[in-house]
Image (cartoon, grey):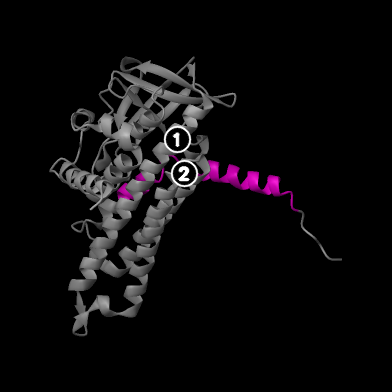
Amino acid sequence: MSQASFVDDALRTTAAQLFGGGDRLVPLAVLVDLGWSELAAEDLPTAVSVLAEEQGRRLGLSRLAELAMCAAAPSLLDPADSALVFAVQPRLGVTFLHGSSVDGIVLADGRGAPTFVVPVSTEGRVTLRRLPAGEVDIAPVTGIDPDARVTRVRCNAEGGVPVEPGAWEAAVAAGSLAVAHELVGVAEAMLDLAVTHVSERRQFGVPIGSFQAVQHRLADVLVDVSAGRAVCRTAWIDRDRFACAAARSAAGRAFETAMRHCQQVLGAMGSTWEHPLHRYQRRGLLLERLLDPAPTLREALSTVVVDQRRAEVLEG
């Protein structure tokens, strides 16, 4: 076994124990005590990919996406005394808000931070506006996934410190990959639930997993999960923002395929409150709202079209 494989396996085992506990919430202090800073500095792709996938697979909670952004751009904020505010309305941009009206969320364990940092789009640049906790209105989010324990932040913010474009792009790229890996973990967990069900459920005297239609559906899920993970790993090579947005999109596709096909093969069982499938569906739907890749992918498409300068040839 190579050293890289040993580190990967050891970290995955530790992560499974962390996120598989009764509470599932891993506070920032616990990650720091376990050596997050050292591991991120030495091998950020392994640290993020393994922890995020296990977090998704176990429905764990942490500020991992935020930590990945801070590791890629240390000047962004100090997560020990500040929490990053994520935009909740995709139309407002990738992760930042327009104007002075703040309406966003902080991840689990971030609610108690003494300071909130709001990335704001100002004349094409990103500025960070730091707000003391006493100046913002906070409330728990009880929407599609109340178990995620995200907190809504509302206030008005003025001023701010400009962020270097390169630093912000690096942060968004790393955060996007963290969310992407978590979506892959969620999709893989749903696939495991479906495979277990079709192996045990019998119809006409045989497991329903022996039926070709069921096999094809779950094979589609496996292909998309494998593709999503592969695109994520490729994007870590140079962390190009377009590649990272594509990885985030591929992971979203894996989740959507798993949500559709796993629900289908589980049938009525998967629709019950007692079965855990709906918990993964809820978590994935929430994650899809974080670091929406659509604006970046539209920019990439526009760039390709303009650079190629191709014209349609019409025949009279």
Is residue 22 at least partly visible in the picture? yes
Does residue 284 belong to the magenta stretch? yes
Question: 214 or 219: nearer the eye?
Answer: 219
How many numbered dots are placed on residues in this image? 2
Q: Amino acid at mark 1?
A: Val
- From the top left corner, tell me how far across and down residue 63 is, in percent: 29, 34
- From the top left corner, tell me how far across and down residue 44 is, in percent: 34, 37
First along the sequence among labels 2 and 1: 1
Question: 74 or 1: nearer the eye?
Answer: 1
Q: In the image, 212: left or right of 90?
A: left
Q: Which residues are magenta?
A: 282-310
Q: Residue furthest bottom?
A: 204
Q: In the image, 261: left or right of 95?
A: left
Q: In percent of the image, x 59 and y 42: which residue is there?
A: 299
Q: Residue furthest front?
A: 2
Q: In percent of the image, x 25 and y 32: which residue is there?
A: 36
Q: Residues within 10 Å of mark 1 (few under 14, many from 20)?
A: many
Question: 305 or 85: nearer the eye?
Answer: 305
User: Which quarter of the image is occupied by the C terminus?
Assistant: bottom right
Q: Which residue is mark 2?
A: 244
Q: Which secondary structure lies at badge 2?
A: helix
* Labelled pair 2, 1 in contact (Cβ < 8 Å): yes
Is 128 rendered above or below residue 31? above
Q: In percent of the image, x 37 and y 55: which residue is there?
A: 255
Does residue 293 belong to the magenta stretch? yes
Is residue 252 at least partly visible in the picture? no
Q: Residues within 10 Å of mark 2 (few under 14, many from 20)?
A: many
Per the rendering, the mark at residue 172 is 1
